[in-house]
Amino acid sequence: MSVKRTFIPAIVAAAAVMLAGAVQAATLENLERERGIVIEALLDPSLTPRQRQDKIAVSKRRLVDLERMVLRDKSLAERHDPVVRKAFDNYDLTFLIHASVEKNAALIDHWLQQVGVSTHTLMNARLGRR
Amino acid sequence: MENRSANVPDLVKVILWLAAIVYLVMALTLPAAAGTPSWQPNASERLVKLPSTYLKKAIERDFEESDLAAAMSDVGSRIVGKSRTLEDLQAAVEQAEGEVKTELRHQFLAEKQKFIRLVGERQELRQKQIKTRIRVYEKLLAKLERRGAGSSPAGEKLLEKQKQARQRFENSVAAVDMKLFGSAAAGESKYARDYSKNMAVIETLVSAVKKHPMSAEPEIDGRPISKQDYLRQLIANNGSSLALLDQEENILGYMAKLVALDAMALAEEVAADDGGDDGVEMGELSVSSAVDFFINR
């Protein structure tokens, strides 16, 4: 009887603590890092087309997983910092792979479109001094 | 120098007086404080997180371990003993005669008075218990409501955006899988494989949790209610217990009044018995018996 009295509250307390303490993985930070690497690969003039393609293919697989981790991360609902706000302000830029596949566009085309660079804007651009 | 040495005994005197006063105050207040049984439950975060059905039990368990519960149990057992004494005395009074009967009736009244005092003591402790319980429930309710009202408009907006993003993701995930992992060459990643495996386990566990009797949502009239509503219900129930306790105090008051009346009656009877012959004489000298004085001249 005394064993019951001693252990049951202890077990309940432990369970409550376990429920309360969710695993804190920096999912969004990891995604941002990987996204930075992909964009760098997209813009790096020193890479040959083949090298760029290989680099993007590797990052793309990682990005799919990281994007899903962020979208499934419930701890982000409790974070109201600017990083999270900025990330969810623009789905198309944050979740590059999912958005590009959804729109049936190549990754580079999708990204350029999102940052406002299109064939039309490029054709209209003029070289000048600022 | 002399002046300073003259001041030293004065200072010692003042210190001694102060020490005596402090000792006296402590001696007067400490036993009173130590003698009052208490129950001081904490409306902790752990309680807020507990399932509704377990919440009440956890508070009751905390109470059972308190000084107040021990005092209530002690008074309860003394009341049981006292009611047995009263039963015995009542039976004895019915069988006794003469002076022994008067003595037993006196004792019976004295025991009744003690019984009422004990019941009054228990009422006070119960009142303390219920009031403390209500205070804990109110604190828990306030915590729950603060939690619900904690998000700002900006936070709400962000939550809504996250919800929309998840919705959009859920709608496109099948198409993305088909396009990215459709070919045999590009299989699923370790994360995707493990995620699906874990998801199946989680779903089994979630259904087990839902079916578990301890996670059953509390109900009122067969309808499930939220934790806040459950706490409000508990507060209302305890409020009605307090009201009933108040009514029971009235009953005790009437009991005490009856004991006082019985005591007065007993005192009158004893006085009448002590009067003895005077009473008989008074009876003989009644007004009706004196009528003859007025008729026969």
Image (spheres, coloured by chain):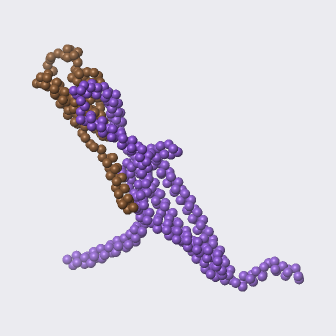
Residue B279 horizontal/vertical position (percent):
72, 82
Query: What color does chain B have in the rendering?
Result: purple
- In which quadrant is the N terminus of chain B drawn? bottom left
Q: Residue at x 59, y 67 (%)?
A: B255
Residue reaching furthest to the right: B297
Left or right: A81 with respect to B111? left
Where B187 falls versus B238 (above or below)?
above
**Residue B74 location, x and y as percent?**
46, 68
**Which quadrant of the rendered structure holds the C terminus of chain B?**
bottom right
Give the image location of residue B238, x and y in percent: 49, 54
Name the residue at 53% across, 66% down: B119
Left or right: where A44 falls relative to A70: left
Q: Residue at x 21, y 27 (%)?
A: B185
Q: Do we see residue B29 in this rendering?
A: no
**Number of labelled discs?**
0
Q: Nearer the viewer, residue B29 or B1?
A: B29
Question: Percent x, y for residue B261?
Answer: 63, 71
Above or below, B117 relative to A80: below
Identify by letter the chain in brown.
A
Viewer-proximal residue, B142 or B194?
B194
Does residue A106 lie above or below A83 as drawn? above
Please name whichever residue, B81 or A4, is drawn nearer the observer in this view of the structure: A4
Q: Classify residue B168 by image quadrant.
A: top left
On the image, which quarter does residue B9 sit in?
A: bottom left
